[in-house]
Amino acid sequence: MGTIEVFEVMIGTLGRKRAVRVYLPNDYSNNDRRYPVLYMHDGHNLFTVETSAYGGIWNVHQTLDDIESRTQQNVIVVGIDCDPIKRLSEYSPWKSGFPGFLLPKGQDRHQGGEGDQYLNWLVQDLIPMIDEKYRTASVNYMAGSSMGGLISLYAGVRHPGIFKTVGCFSSAFWFSHRKLMAFLKAHPNPKLSVYLDLGTKESKNPVLNRLYIKDSTEVFKLLKKQGYANTKFIIEKGANHSEKSLAGRFPGFVKWLLKL
């Protein structure tokens, strides 16, 4: 089995501590190979039920262990925990203009706007730290769900050349959809590979559920129009907004990512 190391870092520009969870492939200690790195948001939901926000996990380690056993291919995963209070702020470069009833209960409708600070730390501090500490191949990917999908797509376009591929699961593009679309139109990066997915039952709120589907579809169509040659878009019938659904689609993403 692969191993998971956990350490704490400081996001200097935001003045916040953060746990980072690093999955190392099963054969990491048995060779001198270098591995590509998949950076993932909401790291506490990836590996262990004890740290999960809602009791479910992506089972990232088990999926990668299984793929490695069959194909001898694997990646290092760097899972970055979210801030339980500032998650919406860190995962969007823009404020949300949506009415409060469309946001999670108790969240300020005007949250958002710290995405660039979060990503600047990730690109300028965390990636060099990971490259120094582990045997990386200087090939970076990024993935996340919901707001993590939003910030992953933004990161891939905002930092061309840093991330080769982004995975956007059940993305909350509705949070800042107009600003996101305007940004994508103004900054095409067709060399970026983009994976998009969602379910048909992302939200019990019918308005929000339609937005999940409509907004992801619009993003996909725009990327294709702009010449993004390597894109994949999946709509899973009946799937909801849960770690169980994400765990079910994650193996397909990895196989697509590694061209297996």
Image (tube, rainbow, N blue to C red):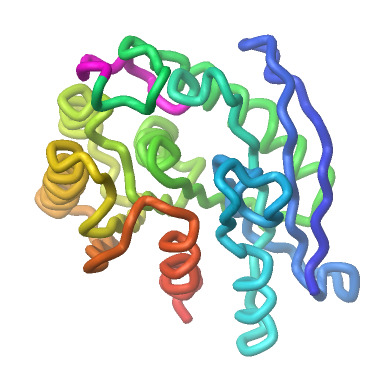
Q: Residue at x 15, y 25 (%)?
A: 178
- How many badges with numbers are in the image? 0
User: What's drawn in magenta, residue-wise?
Assistant: 91-100
Above or below, 199 against 236 in this view is: above
Q: Is residue 249 highlighted in magenta?
A: no
Q: Where is residue 63 in the image (x, y as percent from the top left)?
A: 60, 72
Query: Which quadrant of the figure has residue 156?
Result: top left
Q: Residue at x 25, y 22 (%)?
A: 101
Q: Is the magenta stretch mostly helix, strand or loop?
A: loop
Q: Quadrant of the N terminus?
A: bottom right
Q: Residue at x 19, y 38 (%)?
A: 208
Q: In this view, does 50 lie to the left or right of 223?
A: right
Above or below, 134 against 64 in this view is: above
Q: Position of residue 48 (x, y in %)?
A: 71, 55
Q: Which residue is drawn at 41% across and 34% down?
A: 151
Above or below, 125 against 148 in this view is: above
Query: Which quadrant of the figure has residue 248?
Result: bottom left
Query: Which quadrant of the figure has residue 235?
Result: bottom left
Q: Is residue 95 highlighted in magenta?
A: yes
Q: Residue furthest right?
A: 30
Q: In this view, does 194 lie to the left or right of 258?
A: left
Q: Nearer the viewer, residue 161 or 29?
A: 29
Q: Where is residue 146 in the image (x, y as percent from the top left)?
A: 38, 42
Q: Is residue 62 left or right of residue 221?
A: right
Q: Which of 145 and 163 is in front in this view?
A: 145
